[in-house]
Image (spheres, rainbow, N blue to C red):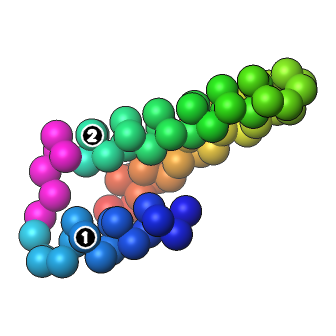
Amino acid sequence: MIALLVRDFGVLNKTDREIGTAESLNFSALYIKLGVAFGGFVWYYFVQQSAAEYMSAFVMEEILALDNVFAITLIF
């Protein structure tokens, strides 16, 4: 997590610029792939029940994040 934050704030966002839709979608896809890959790691090295619980929580968190986008859109 710290490495991702350093990469995001220290490397990618040194200058003040607008992030385009394609770049935003690419970053979202990258972070989702990392989360799913971690779920695969948990499934391979630990009990499958733990992987199922992790993936359920991961999907629920993604749905709630999307719900927040819609709520903020309605407010503004």
Q: Badge 2 is on which residue? A: 26
Quadrant in which residue 17 is drawn: bottom left
Give the residue at mark 1: 11
The residue located at (75%, 33%) in the rendering is 42
- Residue closest to the eye, 6 or 67: 6
* Residue 31 image position (x, y, % from top left): 44, 44
The answer to if 42 sits in the magenta stretch is: no
Query: Disc 2 versus disc 1: distance between alpha carbons?
Result: 16 Å
Q: Does residue 67 appear in this view?
A: no
Q: Residue at x 16, y 40 (%)?
A: 22
| 14 over 30 or under it: above or below | below
- In the image, residue 12 lies at what x, y percent? 22, 66
Q: Residues within 10 Å of mark 1 (few under 14, many from 20)?
A: few
Q: Quadrant of the image for the N terminus?
A: bottom right
Please say whether residue 61 is visible from this viewpoint. yes
Residue at point 68%, 32% (across, down): 41
Q: Amino acid at mark 1?
A: Val
Look at the image and give the residue range highlighted in magenta: 18-23
Q: To which quarter of the image does residue 18 belong?
A: bottom left
In the foreground, 63 or 47: 47
